[in-house]
Image (tube, rainbow, N blue to C red):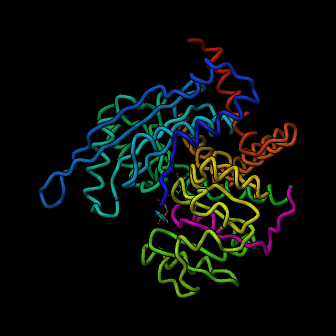
Amino acid sequence: MTRLNVESITTNQLEAAANLLQLSPEMRLRLRTPFREITVQVPVLMDDGSVRVCIGHRVQHNGARGPTKGGVRYHPTVDLDEVRGLATLMTWKTALLDLPFGGAKGGVSVDPSELSRTELERLTRKFTERIAIALGPYRDIPAPDMGTDGQVMAWMLDEYSAKRGYTPAIVTGKPITLGGSYGREAATGRGVMIVMREAAREYGIPWKGGTAALQGFGNVGSHLASFLYEEGVRIVAVTDATGGVFSDSGLDIPALTKHVHSTHGVAGFEGGDPLTNEKLWSVPCDYMIPAALGGVITKEDNANELACRVLVEAANGPTTPIADKILAERGILVLPDFLANAGGVVVSYFEWTQNLQQFRWDEEQVNSALEKKMVAAYREVAGVAREHDVTLRTAAYAIALRRVAEAEEMRGL
Ligand code: NAD
């Protein structure tokens, strides 16, 4: 699989919007350059008594608009370049949704499925300890991403609080018992569905009875699939790290969810025919949804083969800049990542504010506030795209860049 070329994806995407806003070369440089990058050694005591050393990173890209915010990824392909690019995307995402945050990202180069629960806990505690100097509820607030979940956040919270006093606002995406927010776990998937529905209305793309194909059935993919299924969208293909399934008449998503819970993967699901990740991209559908790794839609591999009307970027950074151009030429609408998958950070923001106030919202309040935010962001982006005759991605960048540039300018050097 082609790796995410973060430098080219984020830099390239940013330029079109920076030109639209006529930003000065100095401001472009300030917006492009990360504020702080930390690389740490993470030694882990394994259950057999041996010691394994992993490498971890935390990049704080820009904090002009507030404390930096972004997930922690555990995956073997994690490196500083990837974390830097993902941190940059978080700056644009929080600005686009008008949240009082900047952007950050963290990660450890490790395959969490190879670790026991106790090894995973020791890894998480050591990583937290080594980056804690740069964290804080008003400084930098991690959240889950690929390979991490509420339990990992609980260990991070405990490790941080043990030395600094009880600090629930230090991470979001926590279990409800520890101050997590109702609706946070499903928030990214719910947000993707809301943006898809808005785009379907505007562009006249089939919704009820429309078809979708999906890569990734983890936190984002599985919740999104359930919401689409409830809405009456027919999901014809799903793949994950273990393999995939296809059914022209639509997959039974509740049954697939049960299968994935019990076998830890999509492969082997009997309600469809086997499908590889390579073949997924040419499946004819209305909505093609990468919801796993970045850098998967490329000129070399599949940009010319996609047979969809809309590419929904539920994953972060799934499309390379050249592939993006090909899709535009082919008339395929792209719902850009930092708009489509922003639901998670929106509800993370709600969780953080609830923690700071020691107060809890009910799920209905969370979901309706999320809906409002996502619809407003989509409409603002669509409006700018229409006004300037640019893609949704360039429009989203223009809105986000303007907000961050204004904050940078006002705060001064
Ligand atoms: P997850 O770890 O819960 O699930 C990841 C999924 O990707 C799994 O189904 C896994 O099998 C699949 N996968 C991993 N490697 C693969 C490969 N080589 N080929 C095919 N499938 C593969 O992760 P998640 O939290 O659902 O995140 C998925 C994507 O969404 C990531 O790009 C992440 O950055 C982005 N995202 C997540 C959130 C969030 O709130 N969790 C928010 C915004 C964006």
In this rendering, position of residue 43 left or right of residue 106: left
* Residue 182 visible (yes or no): no
> Does residue 281 appear to the left or right of 193 in the view shown?
left
- The quadrant of the image that shows the C terminus is top right
Question: Residue 326: x percent and y percent?
Answer: 70, 54
Q: How many marks?
A: 0
Query: Relative to 314, is 269 above or below?
Result: below
Q: Nearer the viewer, residue 19 or 234?
A: 19
Name which quarter of the figure residue 238 lies in.
Answer: bottom right
Viewer-proximal residue among 69 and 354: 69
**Extreme-front residue of the structure:** 300
Residue drawn where x is 73% and y is 40% of the image: 394
Answer whether residue 314 is visible to the viewer in this image.
yes
209 in the magenta segment: yes
Quarter of the image holding residue 408? top right
Residue at figure coordinates x 34%, y 58% from the top left: 111
From this viewpoint, which residue is outermost toward the top? 413
Asked whether, in this view, residue 80 is left or right of residue 345, the answer is left
What segment is highlighted magenta in the picture? 203-226
Q: Tell me the residue at 58%/85% (across/down).
A: 272
Q: Percent from the top left, x then y, of residue 181? A: 55, 49
Residue 276: x, y in percent?
52, 75
Residue 34: x %, y % from top left: 49, 28
Q: Is residue 176 above or below residue 258?
A: above
Q: Is residue 212 magenta?
A: yes
